[in-house]
């Protein structure tokens, strides 16, 4: 990142006025979940935006409302924090809705920050007669009329933003690691995300389905940039409701593809659920690194070394299809083993980048073929002649050339993978074999 401070722009307003739609339009991709339901955005999410030759951070916040409980108070507190840290505040209202006390209270709160505040009256396409003067009653001088759905007025707002922030550029390190935190609802993903980020970035509550967007934060560990992705809980297909929750689950699945390594969180009091195995299978199929994490270890009944020694073999049995995935027991409350996750992440990344010389690979291939000749099917005996590692693949992938390879028994492929790991490592990451007949 450049030495010039990168500007932060926060979007605030009541629920369902179009904040997330504006956010997506400004960053030119669908990052925030949008739906015709009030309260879709719960966490404050941030992404890089660029306009007029300037980079800045754009923050999308939850809908402002009266806090009725501690959970809602946490959400509203995040909005205030986003406004306090912002350099420019964009307050959005529905152009077709009457200005109410909540709008007035929010406008006063934003003006008290002494930051540049602009008012965006959105959804003007739904208003028959526009009277700009009525919006100025909120006391905000800069007023913009927009229709995000029709891309009207966006450039004017962004022009204002560009004039109000310094020229700066955001440079993402090519060496950045991406870690996706996955699991069923209420497995403790956001709590771990917060513990790793060391700040209240995501909302933590003792209820399922709190996180809907993929929440992100970049941290540094041993001079390495690590982007943490906190995802929505993944439910069984039949349990996923249509609408915003369905989008959230899709967003979580796309986070697997984006990540280098995934953490699969499992509540210590709800282990061995079939869905956890399915999620681990998706990570394996995507070719991403994987760590099995038993969360909430601080509230485990009768936790001690004996309990851990009993649970570990049971979990290993249930996840026998990913024997290479390390297992760790954590507590986000006490911080137990949180740092250890960073150590595992860097170790797995190093293993994933291991490149083996072709001569070493073929020496190994000849050795295991002599020790245990390939088993085939249909009375056809495959022959394995030579192999190479794909150079341009981020996942450890190997091409093996031979004859009658399509008749190679699946058990022999499993034997090859086991022997490869014994010889070369690759802990924490799947490896892929592609077989080709020389002819």
Image (cartoon, grey):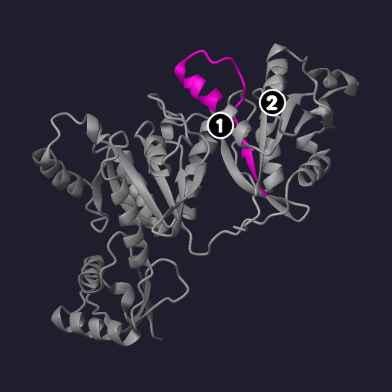
Quarter of the C terminus within the rendering: bottom left
Question: In whole angstroms, how far apart are the C-alphas of marks 2 and 1?
Answer: 29 Å
Q: Nearer the viewer, residue 227 or 404?
A: 227
Residue 244 disc label: 1
Image coordinates of residue 348 in percent, x first then y, are 33, 61
**Is 22 part of what is drawn in magenta?**
no
Classify residue 328 as left or right of residue 126: left
Does 152 sit above or below residue 380?
above
Q: Which residue is mark 2?
A: 110
Does 139 sit above or below residue 146?
above
Q: Nearer the viewer, residue 259 or 171?
A: 171
Asked if residue 130 can be seen in this view, the reply is no
Classify residue 309 as left or right of residue 340: left
Tell me the quarter of the picture where residue 130 sits.
Answer: top right
> Mark 2 or mark 1, which is nearer to you?
2
Classify residue 167 as left or right of residue 195: right
Seen at 64% across and 23% down, the residue is 15
Seen at 48% across and 39% down, the residue is 249
Quarter of the N terminus within the rendering: bottom right
Within 10 Å of the Cα at label 1, are there few (<14), some (14-19), or many (20+) other Cα atoms? some
Magenta segment, which residues?
A: 56-77
Within 10 Å of the Cα at label 2, are there few (<14), some (14-19), or many (20+) other Cα atoms? many
Asked if residue 280 can be seen in this view, the reply is yes
Does 162 sit above or below residue 107?
below
Q: Nearer the viewer, residue 226 or 129?
A: 226
Classify residue 245 as left or right of residue 365: right
Image coordinates of residue 112 in percent, x first then y, are 69, 24
Tell me the quarter of the picture where residue 158 sits.
Answer: top right
Image coordinates of residue 341 in percent, x first then y, are 32, 50
Image coordinates of residue 217 in percent, x first then y, are 50, 45
**Is 68 part of what is drawn in magenta?**
yes
Seen at 57% across and 31% down, the residue is 81
């Amino acid at each position: 990142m450049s030495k010039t401070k990168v500007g932060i722009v926060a979007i605030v307003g009541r629920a369902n006025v179009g904040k997330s739609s504006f956010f997506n339009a400004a960053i030119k991709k669908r990052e925030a979940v949008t739906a015709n339901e009030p309260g879709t955005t719960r966490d404050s999410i941030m992404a890089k935006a660029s306009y007029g030759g300037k980079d800045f951070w754009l923050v999308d916040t939850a809908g402002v409302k009266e806090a009725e409980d501690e959970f809602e108070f946490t959400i509203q507190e995040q909005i205030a924090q986003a406004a306090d840290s912002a350099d420019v505040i964009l307050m959005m209202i529905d152009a077709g809705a009457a200005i109410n006390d909540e709008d007035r209270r929010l406008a006063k709160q934003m003006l008290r920050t002494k930051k540049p505040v602009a008012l965006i009256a959105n959804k003007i396409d739904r208003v028959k007669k526009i009277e700009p003067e009525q919006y100025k009653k909120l006391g905000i001088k800069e007023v913009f009329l927009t229709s995000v759905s029709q891309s009207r007025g966006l450039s004017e707002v962004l022009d204002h933003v560009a004039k109000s922030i310094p020229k700066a550029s955001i440079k993402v390190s090519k060496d950045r690691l991406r870690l996706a935190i996955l699991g069923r609802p209420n497995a403790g993903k956001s709590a771990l995300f917060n513990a790793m980020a060391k700040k209240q970035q995501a909302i933590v509550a003792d209820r399922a389905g709190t996180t809907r967007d993929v929440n992100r934060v970049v941290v540094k560990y041993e001079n390495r940039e690590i982007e943490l992705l906190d995802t929505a809980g993944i439910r069984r297909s039949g349990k996923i409701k249509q609408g915003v929750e369905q989008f959230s689950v899709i967003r979580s699945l796309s986070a697997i593809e984006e990540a280098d390594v995934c953490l699969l969180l499992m509540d210590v009091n709800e282990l061995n659920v079939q869905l956890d195995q399915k999620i681990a299978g998706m990570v394996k199929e995507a070719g991403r690194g994987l760590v099995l994490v038993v969360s909430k270890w601080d509230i485990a009944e009768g936790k001690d070394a004996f309990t851990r020694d009993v649970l570990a073999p049971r979990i290993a049995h249930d996840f026998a299809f990913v024997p290479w995935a390390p297992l760790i027991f954590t507590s986000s409350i006490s911080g137990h083993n949180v740092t250890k996750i960073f150590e595992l992440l860097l170790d797995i990344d190093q293993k994933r980048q291991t490149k083996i010389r072709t001569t070493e690979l073929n020496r190994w291939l000849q050795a295991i073929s002599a020790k245990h000749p390939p088993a085939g099917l249909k009375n056809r005996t495959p022959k394995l002649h030579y192999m190479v590692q794909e150079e341009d693949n981020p996942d450890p992938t190997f091409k093996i050339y031979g004859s009658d390879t399509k008749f190679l028994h699946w058990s022999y492929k499993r034997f090859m993978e086991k022997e490869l790991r014994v010889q070369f490592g690759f802990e924490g990451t799947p490896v892929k074999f592609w077989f080709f007949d020389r002819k």
